[in-house]
Image: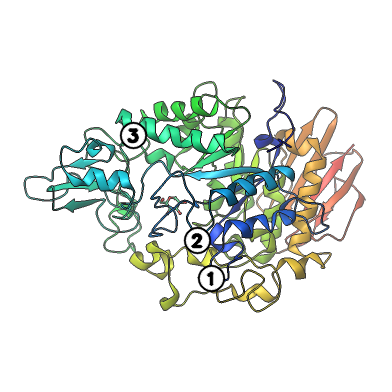
Amino acid sequence: MVPTLPPPPMSGHLAWWQTGVIYQIYPRSFGDTTGNGIGDLQGIIDHLDYLNGEADQSLGVDAIWISPFYPSPMADFGYDVADYCDIEPLFGDLATLDRLIAEAHAREIRVVVDYVPNHSSDQHPWFIESRSTLDNPKRNWYIWSDGRTDGSPPNNCGSPFVGPAWTLDPPTGQFYLHQFLPEQPELNWREPGLAAAMLDVLRFWLDRGVDGFRMDVVGMIIKDAGLGDNPPNPNADPTLHADDIFGRQLHVFNEDQDDVHEVIRMFRSVLDEYSDRVAIGELGYGMSRWVRYYGTDGDGLHLPFNFRLMHTTWEAGAIRRSVEKLEATLPSWAWPSYVLGSHDAPRLASRIGAAQARVAAMLLLTLRGTPTLYQGDELGIENGVILPDQLQDPQGLRLGMDRSRDPSRTPMQWDAGPHAGFSTTESWLPLSADHRIRNVATQAEDPTSMLTLYRCLLEYRRSTQTLTVGQYESVPNSRDDDCFTFRRRHQDSERLIALNLTGKEQRLSMPDDRQASIELSTHLDRLGSMTLHNFTLRPDEGLIIEVE
Ligand code: GLC
């Protein structure tokens, strides 16, 4: 394969994962080319021009992160891996993946793959061996323990998917740990043989040309060596499902242990054997614990995902405080990231409403740091309606409809046809009800659609260094409770971002007499000069303003 990507940055320059925008693909729901109602790798290849190509409709993203495509019994839709170094036949094969990487690189799209280091599938040959006998050489590759004298599990840990995090395996009389499903036994990173094998998995994919990894629940991979009991969470939601043990605990002993950073440093040293690769981590702790995942002087994750804005009340003050706390906490060398949607969370447009979803798009693409955009959010797709007999997600099946993640996993909507251009047949999850209006073909033709807004924002961001590399500065305004304003500055260039977080018109004034002009409105209908000491944001409007 001829490498077509630009060379890695000189020191002092920013890397692609700092200036670029990442787009998350949930492969089951992106494009089905075999007619079985389930997306596949060829379906991703077929839509690469949409992601970054010559076509007018092209979105213009810099990288894709693909959720797991490894062989899997699909108990947790691929997050239960039965072979870390192959492709699930439903999705294709290694040759298809190689083509995907080459075709993506030819379009200057980097490819980030999911790495699931906390647990494998119970069908992984390692686990089959491990559970076979007490003295199997791979016994310690997983976390086994005797129960307590009364026969109960070794500690009180619960699973976010319901019930205890331990299952008794009668043939050997010991319990194994699974913080998720019983079909997802936990790997033992304290065992050198397992650690070496899992580091080789990274090399396997790096050698194939992937540009980095999104590391699944990476803060959970090391647990307290003494398997201590978690204390109760005094603030637990009283309406939790009766068997939601996990939700009622403070996770003192099962995650975010100090020695997790040693493993993360091992990940980094493998990535550093290659040039220009990225380590992204899925984790969410309080700011002071979370920031440690960047490592000391940058020997940890390049980008610990920052999910805070997904959990922040959608109000100007709360959003400002979250952003500014991050800005104040990060060491100067650490690069921020922002995520507003994923396959695990309700759809952004359903959470904050269709009108505010446009403001959110401007926020995500103008803050300092790497944005990750979830497939379909660029169309404003809303939560799918899943009937009880259509439920697929193991979390929803165990904890109830309101905990199901299916509504955000419905198929990508490409056109207004009967199967939304996703498939030629009924899809594995029903299409979201909005597919006839919220689809790529329809919105590409509409000069004020959500897709057009995303394309304009992405293009503007790409061509405006101030937005990719500029500093963040706080800017108070006369309506601070309703509007979030901030500045991005790089050398002599300055942009003011003004976001109306309400459905009401807001008049703003700032003590600033400089020349200013509107570069982009979320309504996509106005441009041109304005004054900063007195201006109006229409309901749900965001503006990018150039200040001279
Ligand atoms: C991560 C994934 C989620 C999965 C879980 C267990 O949170 O994003 O989809 O269920 O890990 O692997």
Mark 1 touching mark 2, by CB under 8 A?
A: yes
Where in the figure is residue 377, as x and y percent of width and height? 64, 59
Locate residue 392, reporting x and y percent.
Answer: 43, 68
* Quadrant the C terminus occupies: top right
Q: In which quarter of the image is the N terminus?
A: top right
Mark 1 sits near ligand 1, with its Cβ under 8 Å away: no
Mark 2 Cα shell of 10 Å, populated few (<14), some (14-19), many (≥20): some
Occupied quadrant, residue 337: top right
Which of disc 2 and disc 3 is earlier in sequence? Answer: 2
Helix, strand or loop under label 3: helix
Residue matched to label 2: 90
Judging from the image, the colouring scheme is: rainbow
x and y, in percent, of residue 434 in the image:
64, 74
Q: How far apart are marks 1 and 2 (CA)?
A: 9 Å
Mark nearer the viewer, 3 or 2: 2
Quick one: which residue is furthest to the left in this view? 149
Q: Are marks 3 and 2 in contact (CB under 8 Å)?
A: no
The answer to whether residue 303 shows anywhere in this view is no
Q: In this view, does 56 lie above or below 425?
A: above
Whether residue 504 sits left or right of residue 548 in the image: it is left
Identify residue for label 3.
Answer: 194
Residue 416, given in percent of the width and then of the height, sits at: 71, 75
Q: Depth-wise, is mark 1 or mark 3 nearer the camera? A: 1
Q: Element under label 2? A: loop
Label disc, if present, on residue 36 of the rendered structure: 1
Residue in the image at 29% along x and 31% along y: 191
Q: Which of marks 1 and 3 is nearer the N terminus?
A: 1
Type of amino acid under label 3: Leu
Residue placed most toward the observer, 91 or 312? 91
Question: In this image, 542 relative to 203: left or right?
Answer: right
